[in-house]
Image (spheres, rainbow, N blue to C red):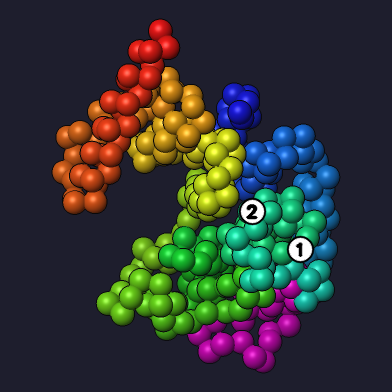
Amino acid sequence: MIKAQLVHAFTHAALSPDPDLAIPALMIARVEYPRLDAGPYLDRLDAIGREARTRVDAAAEVPVDAPQRADPDDYSRVMALNEYLFDELGFVGNSVTYEDPRNSFLNEVLDRRTGIPITLALLYMEVARRAGVHVEGVNFPGHFLLRCPARRGLPQTDDLIIDPFHSGALLSEDACRERLRRHAGEEAGIESPLLAHARKPQILARMLLNLKRLYVQMHSFPQALDVTELLRAVDPSAINELRDRGLLAYHLKDFSSALRDLQAYLRLTGSTPLDEDDREDHAQIWEHVKTLRRRVASLN
């Protein structure tokens, strides 16, 4: 089981106003690699960031191929970052073994130079920050993206929307709208919240949710439970994570903990209006609680 001091340290790092994402991301990796030394990976990020700054500073010339509504300076800097990270260093989206849990760990992404959209985005943000380029996360449905916001005061200038999974490809709003339609159906319409800035806790929660899903699919329930603890640390109000923690404890035959969490879940959601699926979920959880009460009573 995950150590309490790691959960405490992760909570502090995840909720801190410090923009650093690498430290909490490497703490997540300790779910799989408990003895992981984060130091060499942070040093490697610093070295990549220093070289990236050199490339960005040298990219001062206005490029002739900048999109019409793009800030030429931002475009030039992003292209310098893309060339260094994806062309020279060879970071690439892992489309072959997308479901490999290693794609969700920053240490593995740095070692293997491959990952999924969220981890490649995190790497990109950390390198960009070290290189002096303002890049922020976009919690886009289905596929995490990045944005280099247009500088204030520049009329008719668009943000640069970056896809780190596809070598930093730039996406138009129309391309984002098409992606959303493919993900959510023909009736979906792109609205500003879908391209809103993703805060640090949201980015870490998305990493953790993806990792929890993979562990559950693999029936790696102890690791899934550890990830759920970190999800609760990022967002203590996430009631569904309380339910999932109880269900995972049930799988691991920790009946007292399962009963505690599932009863708390029913209590916290009892006054909430429920749709048909939620009512079915509640009924199933209530059956688990009745079974758990009998089990716990028989152990006393």
Assign the N terminus to one quadrant of the image. Answer: top right
Residue where numbered disc 1 is placed: 113
Residue where numbered disc 2 is placed: 101
Q: Position of residue 111 (x, y in %)?
A: 80, 56
Assign the C terminus to one quadrant of the image. Answer: top left
At numbered mark 1, what does the secondary structure look like: helix, strand or loop? loop
Residue 53, quarter of picture: bottom right
Q: Which residues are magenta?
A: 57-86
At numbered mark 2, what does the secondary structure look like: helix, strand or loop? helix
Is 50 positioned to the left or the right of 214 in the image?
right
Query: Does the CB distance between marks 2 and 1 fall below 8 Å?
Result: no
- Residue type at mark 2 is Pro
Question: What number is the disc on residue 174?
Answer: none
Residue 269, quarter of picture: top left
- Crowding at dot 2, Cα within 10 Å, few <14 / some 14-19 / many 20+, comes out as some
Which of these two is toward me, 201 or 63? 201
Which of these two is toward me, 145 or 154? 145
- Crowding at dot 1, Cα within 10 Å, few <14 / some 14-19 / many 20+, comes out as some
Residue shown at 38%/19% (left/top)? 295
| Between discs 2 and 1, the one toward the N terminus | 2
Is 15 positioned to the left or the right of 187 in the image?
right
Does residue 24 appear in this view? no
Q: Say whether residue 74 is magenta.
A: yes
Residue shown at 60%/60% (left/top)? 99
Residue shown at 77%/34% (left/top)? 35
Extreme-bottom residue of the structure: 64
Q: Say whether residue 155 is magenta.
A: no
